[in-house]
Image (cartoon, rainbow, N blue to C red):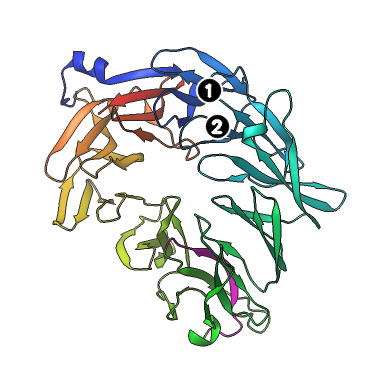
Amino acid sequence: MASCGTKEEDVFQTLEVLHEGGRLLGVDPRQRFLVFTADDGSGTYAKSLPKGGDTRVSDPAEGVFLAEDGDSVLLWGPRNGEQRRTLWLWRPGSKAGIAFSTRAGTDAVHDRSLSYAAFTESDAGTTSLRVMDAATCTAKACRLRTLLQVPGDTLLLQAGGTTVLASDATQAWLIDVPSGAVSPLGTTAGPSLLLGEGSHYSVFDRAGHLQVFDTATRTLQWERSWAEETARKDWTVLSALMTDATTVVLNLQEPPPPPPAFPTKRNVVTCDATACRSLSDLYSSCWYGQGRTDLLRCSGPSRCSTWSGCEYQYAYYDATARHLTTTVSDGLGLPDIAISEDLTQSVSLSRGKSTDTLSWRSPAGYRQVDALGAVNMELFTLLPGAERLVFAQKLTRSNGGSETRVATWDGVTLKDLLALPGVPTTDATYPPVVRDSPLSLYVTVRGPSSVNIVRIRL
């Protein structure tokens, strides 16, 4: 067996199986409870920590959002045949979640405190924007407000604080949730955007110019003629996003060529108050990295082979589009990277023919180490403070068998910690969760006979 960095009795003090036959959905910020979905399809449950019982919260949920104080939880079910889903609100201590919609058409949007949830419902050719106010939603009555109704069945929602931006193919509306006030933004010629915290929004006017406004005052902050500035006349904006620095990123596609050809070339343009510029000819699209609005992840094929497919290059940028680091896939799967909260440090993985190599980039310099086994990227994260990388790796025993073990690397010392009772799940819907005070890692692992939730004290 591969050597372990702790004694056997220490392992049992460090790793605990919290539930057998369940997949982790979320953990309370104060570690009072966790939410999981049962693998047998019986429903979604909340488990009191450290050793409390299980409370059935709802039917099987696809995902959850925990309020920043942990005092309420939003759950959503999978889409049915009509592309509708059920939404629930649950509060710790209550017997069950409150189903406040059974026909939500869009994913619910909300603020960090979960004071509300906004979503759409469609009926008879009309789409309505509904709002659930958490403060007045009880098991006896959960009245919904209708703040906007538009013809058709397409209404996209974005939330920033207590502001919601609603848009369809040609129009946009800015909505103040507490008051219910709706402000039409007029006809738009491209995707409208709302900054994550709601301080700014952007629209494309009828001429296609990109305009960024202050949400509170509705005053124009800057305007750019992106197509003219970047020589991309007649290019189509496929999608767009706005970073925390109010940098707007446009994913573009070339204008249609003469038949029978079809447009294939794509490009990324970034705009701020000073200019619009092409990010790089290497990348065909960008999106938020790891769900963070201060981090961009851009991708594009670097080389392709008839036999092995394409190798893709992934570049990471901060909110101002400043380059941070680059990784390359092996053509078989998507690479990922662990990045510190302040974006100053990152750890990436490169796979060789026989060895996986970890690379740590920081202001202090560049460091590398070879892992002892094959690294499992489903558990690969920097702990708070970026002091250590925690990851899983598959090691071979002396008898020829194998096991998955947890290891840490602080940039200097590579330390093997303990064995996992299975392999970290490959279902990205249920990622590992790190919580502080005490520092703990919660992860779903697939064992020989069941899927289990474990907690590792670090």
Residue bearing mark 1: 92
Query: What x and y, as percent, mark residue 304?
Result: 41, 66
Query: What x and y, as percent, mark residue 178?
Result: 64, 47
Residue at x 22% of width, y 49% of height: 357
Residue 235 shown in magenta? yes
Viewer-closest of 213 and 386 = 213
Residue 364 lies in what quarter of the image?
A: bottom left
Residue 410 lies in what quarter of the image?
A: top left
- Looking at the rendered structure, the number of numbered marks drawn on it comes to 2
Residue at x 46% of width, y 34% of height: 69
Residue 207 lies in what quarter of the image?
A: bottom right
Q: Secondary structure at mark 1?
A: loop
Q: Answer with left or right where residue 146 lies relative to residue 4.
A: right
Query: What x and y, as percent, mark residue 123?
Result: 84, 47
Viewer-closest of 224 and 249 = 224
Q: Can residue 41 be spotted in the picture?
A: no
Q: Secondary structure at mark 2?
A: strand
Viewer-closest of 116 and 242 = 116
Residue at x 73% of width, y 23% of height: 140
Q: Can residue 317 be spotted in the picture?
A: yes
The C terminus sits in image quarter: top left
Image: magenta residue range: 232-244
Residue bearing mark 2: 73
